[in-house]
Amino acid sequence: MPIINLLWMARSIRRIREYKVVGGAVVLALVGLSVVGNAACYYWFDGSVADAKISFGDALWYSVISITTIGYGDYNAETTGARLGTLIFIVLLGLSTFSMFLGIVIEWSSEYITRGRRGMATILVKDHVLVVNVPTSRRVLQVISELRADSTYRDTEVVVVSDQVEEFARPGPNVMFVHGSVLARETFERAHADTAKLAIVLARSYSDSSSDAVVASSVAVLDSINPNMHIVAECLDQKHDLLFESVHCNAVVYSMNISGNLLTQEAQDPGVSQLVGVLTSNVRGTTLFSCEVTDTESSDANYAEIAKMLIDQDINVMCVNRAAESHTSLKSLTPESGDRLIYAARRRLTWRELTQ
């Protein structure tokens, strides 16, 4: 009898794997039938015994304790009818279906965890940050660390999207991974790009000449899904800037050019790289921030006068970005709506906070 029961369970589980949702629903329904059927028998037969004070809630409790094999002993079947009910609904039907149900739950949970670790599951997130491509794990972890150091993104969920690695070692609970082609819409739909607020598209490889073309194509896919998302892309060769002019990208960072310029500048003027390292890191004190100039009618001061005023607050104005031009000479330059003020400070401030 036990061998036949085990064979039946094994065959049933194989069939359920083929039809997971339907099979799981059937097993759950059989478990419910076992619990309710046994409870009804116990309540009907033992509850009718003289001096018996058994409610239907007590009967359900007895049924659940029996099917889970805990058996506290506070209730037990006394009459023949109740014992037959326990034999049919618990011993023959309940124990096997309950064991099968537990097996299904464990298998589904294990499969869900495995799919999540391998980036095959759909991520349930909103207002998150996408980090696209994994040139190296260390590079991605450094980007995430810098994001986390900013109070604005400290608790924001980050989704790493790549087809270059099979699994990604998550550095924290709010970091998830989606595996798939960075040129496929379906991949970004699983990462819920439609609800993301920021995307950082890294180079695929620092030795691959086709990296910039793939990055630009990924930007195009992201923009088609969510035009309101702020997208920053990494470009290795500034000669490829035409690739990004044909797509909507909020900013392109020419990382190799910046790195080469900094190396040369440090060789000529020692100490420059130390300052740049501090100003461009969210981890090390004073950091570069930017704010959009919005209300220009509240003050008649030019940028030079504003910069002098902010010095006393330990805030250093570095430049003003107006369209494609970066102005480092602030004399006689007056604020205009849409300008971007770049400043060094210990926290992010709005234009109104800077000028009040």
Image (cartoon, rainbow, N blue to C red):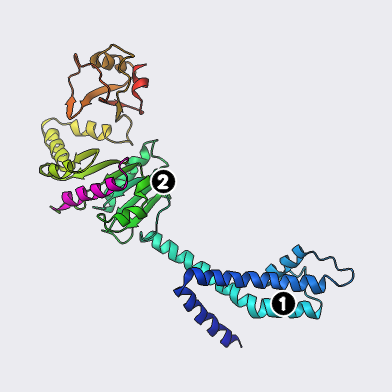
State how far apart marks 1 and 2 are (Cα): 49 Å
Residue pictured at 79% horizontal, 72% vertical: 44
Q: Residues within 10 Å of mark 2 (few under 14, many from 20)?
A: some
Point out which mark residue 126 bears. 2
Q: Is residue 121 left or right of residue 29?
A: left
For label 1, the SS is helix
Q: In this rendering, does residue 68 appear at all?
A: no
Residue 311 x %, y %:
29, 17
Q: Is residue 212 magenta?
A: yes
Residue pictured at 55% horizontal, 69% vertical: 25
Point out which mark residue 86 bears. 1
Q: Main secondary structure of the magenta part?
A: helix
Reply above or below: 95 against 172.
Answer: below
**Could you tell me which quadrant the C terminus lies in?**
top left
Residue interval drawn in magenta: 210-228
Of residue 29 and residue 6, the one placed in the foreground of this image is 29
User: Image quadrant of residue 291?
Assistant: top left
Of residue 9 and residue 323, the one placed in the foreground of this image is 323
For the residue marked with disc 1, what is the amino acid? Thr
Residue 143 x %, y %:
30, 44
Residue 150 x %, y %:
36, 36
